């Protein structure tokens, strides 16, 4: 596992009306601070990546569909430098993934429908100076092949 990455299995709390699933609690070890909450969507087979943050920790939960989330540790001072982690999360595997600053990440919608990921980052998005750094999905800097078939 990449240094600083944490994965927590989540559970559904069902009753006759439906279910509830906790996404992130302030008494969990994964919690640091609160910036904002947002949802991002990927259509089937679409890759959203690569990107990383210098200050922000992300907390990903796929609340609808299924997503392949891939992390790459580009931190030269990390004991897991160069390591790749791949996770399949969503309706069939509800998990919280904590992604530390400077760990490059992306995700791909897998399955037949849209994948919805809720993120609870530790920082508020700064529209004037965003902590958002991008690399192309097919960069040679990351030893990972998304398996995309271009027409």
Image: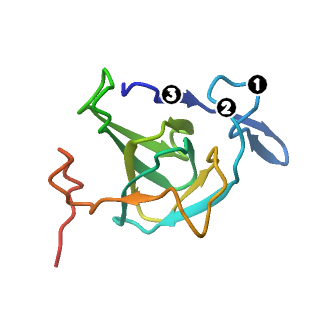
Instruction: Give percent across and percent down for residue 72.
Output: 31, 40
Under circle 2, the secondary element is loop
- Please say whether residue 110 is visible from this viewpoint: no
Instruction: Give percent across and percent down for residue 68.
Output: 38, 49
Q: Quadrant of the C terminus?
A: bottom left
Under circle 3, the secondary element is strand
Q: Compared to 22, does 81 lie above or below?
A: above
**Quick check: 55 left or right of 122?**
left
**Residue assigned mark 2:** 31
Instruction: Give percent across and percent down for residue 112.
Output: 42, 64
Q: Quadrant of residue 38?
A: bottom right
Residue drawn at point x = 39 percent, y = 48 percent: 105
**Residue assigned mark 3:** 6
**Quick check: 83 left or right of 123?**
left
Q: Quadrant of residue 110?
A: bottom left
CA–CA distance between discs 1 and 2?
7 Å
Under circle 1, the secondary element is loop
**Quick check: 18 left or right of 75?**
right
Question: Are the two marked residues, 1 and 2, in contact with CB atoms closer than 8 angstroms?
Answer: yes
Mark 2 vs 3, N-terminal side:
3
Q: Which disc number belongs to residue 16?
A: none
139 or 39: nearer the viewer? 139
Question: Are the two marked residues, 2 and 3, in contact with CB atoms closer than 8 angstroms?
Answer: no
Q: Which disc number belongs to residue 27?
A: 1
17 or 122: nearer the viewer? 122
Q: Quadrant of residue 13?
A: top right
17 or 108: nearer the viewer? 108
- Please say whether residue 130 is visible from this viewpoint: yes
CA–CA distance between discs 2 and 3?
11 Å
């Amino acid at each position: 596992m990449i240094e600083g990455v944490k994965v927590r299995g989540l559970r559904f709390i069902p009753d006759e009306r439906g279910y509830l699933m906790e996404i992130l609690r302030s008494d969990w070890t994964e919690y640091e601070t609160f910036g904002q909450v947002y949802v991002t969507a990927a259509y089937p087979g679409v890759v959203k990546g690569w990107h990383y943050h210098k200050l922000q920790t992300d907390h990903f939960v796929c609340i609808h569909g299924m997503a392949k989330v891939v992390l790459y540790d580009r931190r030269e001072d990390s004991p897991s430098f160069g390591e790749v982690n791949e996770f399949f999360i969503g309706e069939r595997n509800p998990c919280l993934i904590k992604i530390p600053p400077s760990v490059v990440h992306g995700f791909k919608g897998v399955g037949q429908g849209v994948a919805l990921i809720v993120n609870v980052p530790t920082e508020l998005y700064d529209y004037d100076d965003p902590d958002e750094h991008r690399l192309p999905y097919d960069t040679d800097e990351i030893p990972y092949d998304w398996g995309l078939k271009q027409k």
